[in-house]
Image (cartoon, rainbow, N blue to C red):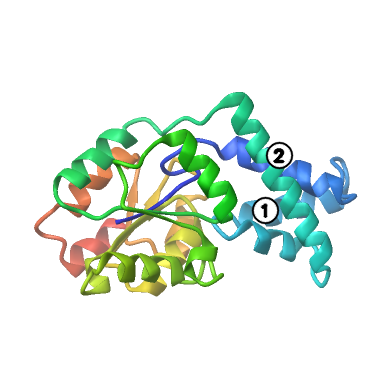
Amino acid sequence: MCLDLAGTTVGDIAMVERAFAEAIATQGIVPGTGAYARAMVHVHRSRGCPTIDVFRGIFPGNEAQAQAANLTFERSYEGTLERAGLTAVPAVMEVLDKLRGNGIKLALITGFSRVTLSRVLSMLDWDDKIDLAISPEDAGGRGRPWPDMVLHAVLRTGVADVRHVAVIGDSENDMLCGTRAGASIVAGLLTGVHSRERLLKGGATHLLDSIADFPSLVLSDDLGTTQIASSAR
């Protein structure tokens, strides 16, 4: 099972968006301007993608500016973590324990850099809860919406068939990643950043009101193709 991090297993959507806003502002795009509004729309649309790719989209053709903004983002986000801490989404610990208790391999996947991911993991202390935590760098540099991180998890855990994979996330890019990787279950979480319509557009096979519903979905014995297709409508 591949689980998204921010917005799916940990509830830090506002912290992430604030760090993006601060990073953009350091590059001369300030609140109250049309450029700032367009940049934040791009941030929202690109949720789930590698943070550096988000900044490359805001500053096309200017790699130095994108890298500078990304560095500011990482410093801002990690500074917020130091001050405010990080909170797991309600019921997520029970979800992880139930899945692990049924012999399922668990991988966290994220658009954060390896440095930021390592900082998050040190605060969560989930070493006994998950098998892998994957950043775009771990999968050769391509993050969502590409399938690489899910396929990397498949290879690392020795899964024999991509159809034995389930993915859960709260963004359209999470859905695209899972769909392109060939996962049988691509569950969209309705409590996150993107709407029902965006999740379905990305290829969600199921829509969930809570991550607490995830174990019963993936442990079901009758996940036929018809049921998967109809449950997303």
Q: Residues within 10 Å of mark 1 (few under 14, many from 20)?
A: many
Query: Residue beneath label 1, please?
Result: 43
Image-quadrant location for residue 64: bottom right
Q: Nearer the viewer, residue 69 or 223?
A: 69
Question: Residue at 22% across / 74% down in the picture?
Answer: 161
**Number of marks present in the image shown:** 2
Tell me the quadrant of the picture where the C terminus can be found: bottom left
Q: Nearer the viewer, residue 69 or 218?
A: 69
Task: Judge left or right: residue 7 versus residue 53.
Answer: left
Q: Residues within 10 Å of mark 2 (few under 14, many from 20)?
A: many
Residue reaching furthest to the left: 221
User: In 3D space, how far apart are the residues under numbered discs 1 and 2 (Cα atoms)?
Assistant: 16 Å
Question: Residue at 15% across / 52% down in the picture?
Answer: 103
Residue reaching furthest to the top: 83
Number of the label disc, if any, that sits on residue 74: none
Q: Is residue 41 above or below residue 180?
A: above
Tell me the quadrant of the picture where the N terminus can be found: bottom left
**Horizontal and vertical percent for residue 10?**
45, 38
Query: Residue beneath label 2, please?
Result: 76
Question: Residue at 75% across / 43% down in the picture?
Answer: 21
Q: Nearer the viewer, mark 1 or mark 2?
A: 2
Q: Which structural element holds mark 1?
A: helix
Disc 1 marks which amino acid? Val
Q: Nearer the viewer, residue 8 or 96?
A: 96
Question: Residue at 61% across / 36% down in the picture?
Answer: 14
Disc 2 marks which amino acid? Ser
The answer to whether any part of residue 66 appears in the image is yes
The answer to whether any part of residue 233 appears in the image is no
1 or 2: tag closer to the N-terminus = 1
